[in-house]
Amino acid sequence: MEWTRHAFMKDELGLDLEQEFTEGRIHMILEYTMKFKKSLQKGDEMQVTCSVAENEKKNRINFVQQILVNGSVYAEAVFVATCLVKGRPSVPDVVKNALAN
């Protein structure tokens, strides 16, 4: 799920995590919840989705992800994240803009 989240951030939001880190912005997961609905079996071909959703706290964002097999949901997860800028939590404008769309 981490790879999908990182790819989503780069491809959909335009955030390259390595570049962000170099520029002093540290993106981090604060907590997550995961619910398993079905068991994955050897040989299952899965698809992992990712989208952003608002968090009740203004300096956090939720990444909502699912593991799908043949269109059926096998697991759902919500990752609560923030971006540290000079040690202070925030949500980048590009992420806020994605929420507005």
Image (tube, rainbow, N blue to C red):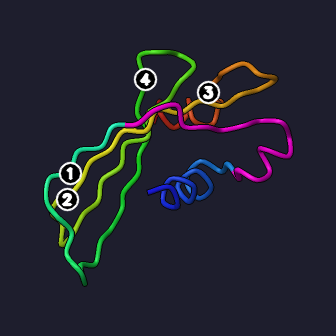
Which numbered mark, 1 or 4, is in the foreground of this view? 1
* The magenta segment: 16-32
99 in relation to 50, above or below? above
Q: CA distance from mark 4 to mark 2?
A: 24 Å
- Whether the residues at callouts 1 and 2 have beta carbons within 8 Å, the answer is yes
Per the image, the residue denoted by label 2 is: 74
- Residue at x 14%, y 53% (from the top left corner): 37
Could you say where residue 14 lies in the image, as x and y percent from the top left? 66, 51
Sequence-earlier tag: 1 or 2: 1
- Whether 24 is among the magenta residues is yes
Sequence-earlier tag: 3 or 4: 4
Q: CA distance from mark 3 to mark 4?
A: 10 Å
Q: CA distance from mark 2 to mark 3?
A: 29 Å
Q: Rate crowding at label 2 as few (under 14), some (14 to 19) or many (20 or more) other CA atoms within 10 Å.
A: some
- Residue at x 79%, y 44% (from the top left corner): 21
Which numbered mark, 4 or 2, is in the foreground of this view? 2
Sequence-earlier tag: 3 or 1: 1
Q: Amino acid at mark 4?
A: Asn
